[in-house]
Image (spheres, rainbow, N blue to C red):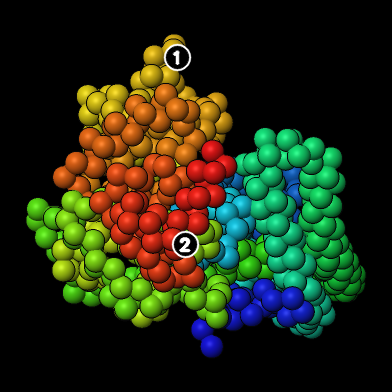
Amino acid sequence: MTDATLAQDEAKPGRRPRLDFGSLARLAPFLAAERGRIVLALAALAAAAAITLAVPLAVRRMVDFGFSADARSLVDAYFGVIVLLTLGLALASSLRYYLVMTIGERVVARLRTAVFDRIMRLDGAFFDSARSGEIVSRLTADTVQLKSTFGASASIALRNLILLVGAVVMMIVTSPTLSAYVLLAIPAIVLPLVAAGRGVSRRSRAAQDSLAEAVAFASERIGAVRVVQGLGGEAAAGRRFAAVVEAAYDAARGATTARAWLTGVLIFLVFASITFVLWTGAKAVIAGEMTAGRLSQFVLFAVFAASALGQLSEVYGELAQASGAAGRLADLLATEPRVVEPAAPLAPMRPARGAIRFEGIRFAYPGAPDRPVLGPLDLVIRPGERVAIVGPSGAGKTSIFQLLMRFYDPDAGAILIDDVPVARMRLAELRGLIAMVPQDPVIFAETIAENIRLARPEADDEAVQAAAEQAAVTAFTARLPEGLSTLVGERGITLSGGERQRIAIARAILRDAPILILDEATSALDAENERAVQAALARAMAGRTALVIAHRLATIRDADRILVLDRGRIVEEGTHETLNAAGGLYARLAALQFTAA
């Protein structure tokens, strides 16, 4: 079983997750680029630990030989050494802090970029089931958790591990007898840590999952706040979000409670052990078996060891939290799209003619494989032909375009553009042949000009202006103080539906592709603007292959050919006049619309 599969299994309800350091190891490639800084950070860590371990040696000498009237110079020397050691410790610690924190920031920046790039390349099947809010949570909450781990937590862990090992060695050198007592107490300290670690990991992962659920819910409702308000659903949404947030709080409180109990138990065991060792050492000093300075040295080393062990226990809990975050991010990075780049790609014809052919296509969406939406489907569209596709809702019209652009691959059959299979083209080259105007265009929180330029990022201002004029965008931007430089808000909330659709049409015009897809491109325009945009689309379609989805049959009277789709199959084909005269499905749809009109 792979790590990704294991992480997914542990996320299932009822499964008890484990602390998985393998998940953290899967992110090791992101650390590899920081090898130089890591080496310097380790050197600074080692220097700080060595200086810390040298302090008890100076204290021992001062206690044993410095407290007498004729040893004033020794006292000055010992305190001078301690000051120098403190200065060295401060410099090493500052360098260590800077290095490890910048390493954490850089690693997380690379990780976020890699995860985002991977998400941008996943296909429709992934997004059919994924929730965008949860993905955003992974990019934010989970990466913040990992930043702490790769930065401060990793530094604390390494520093205290070095201190622990060094202090234990020096304790043994200082007093083997007292060290034996301490070492006997270590299992009593470590075993509760190991036993409680699984519970901390389980609760930490539950807290992270609950937070992701809250972020996903909030993202959906905020993105559609006007719909929520229009339906009077503010109170219900507030109650639902409060419940989700409360669940996240309960999960976080459970994780915190587990860590608090773990910390309390460890502190008690550690300091109880130190108290016992001090009591034993004090009796040895009274009996003359060891000097006060040696006992002081041993106590300091024991305190260092206990402190290091206590901080390691806290880092252990943080690593338990981070392992879940790392597992989820690693799973995203390991997710492979079903639609993949061809191993031996073929270049599209240059210049492209725009001929399209569907051969024996059968298709069902991956989330519902037992409900086919297309097939068997055979279709030939000639270069420069204007073809309309009509039919009732659910007939499979949009699925044809989804397959043509390779958002999905068909279950059977092949699709060709200019006799080149689309599955053999690079995705960027294939999609560069197609411009699309969707029925519900997506507008981003940028300027109108930048929204148009998305179709061709390298386009200059003159090309954007020309596309805006052809799509009648300038008809409404002329009334705006900033014109095409006006910011439109998230999802274009300051624009009307018709204005958003005209921006989408301007994108298609700017793209200047040989194949133009129109999915109810004028459905949100009023009569006056529709005439202007139809004229612009007529100019844009000239010399290009055009596929038009239409529910309003009046907009496709001039199509060269009309295909009538029903239950994934072409049931009729012809012009408006011939299909209307045939008395079939098209004629019935036309009668309903024109009668209602």
* Disc 2 target residue: 585
Q: Residue shown at 84%/52% (left/top)?
A: 243
Q: Residue shown at 73%/35% (left/top)?
A: 230
Q: Earlier in the sequence, mark 1 or mark 2?
A: 1
Return the mark for residue 191. Answer: none
Mark 1: secondary structure? loop
Q: Nearer the viewer, residue 216 or 157?
A: 216
Q: Farthest residue toward the left?
A: 350
Q: Nearer the viewer, residue 534 or 39?
A: 534
Give coordinates of residue 49: x percent, y percent. Answer: 57, 59
- The quarter of the image holding the N terminus is bottom right
* Disc 1 target residue: 480
Confirm whether residue 509 shows in the render: yes
Q: Residue shown at 75%/48% (left/top)?
A: 68
* Horizontal side, residue 185 vs residue 412: left or right: right
- The quarter of the image holding the C terminus is top right
Give coordinates of residue 40: x percent, y percent. Answer: 41, 55
The kind of residue on which mark 2 rests is Leu
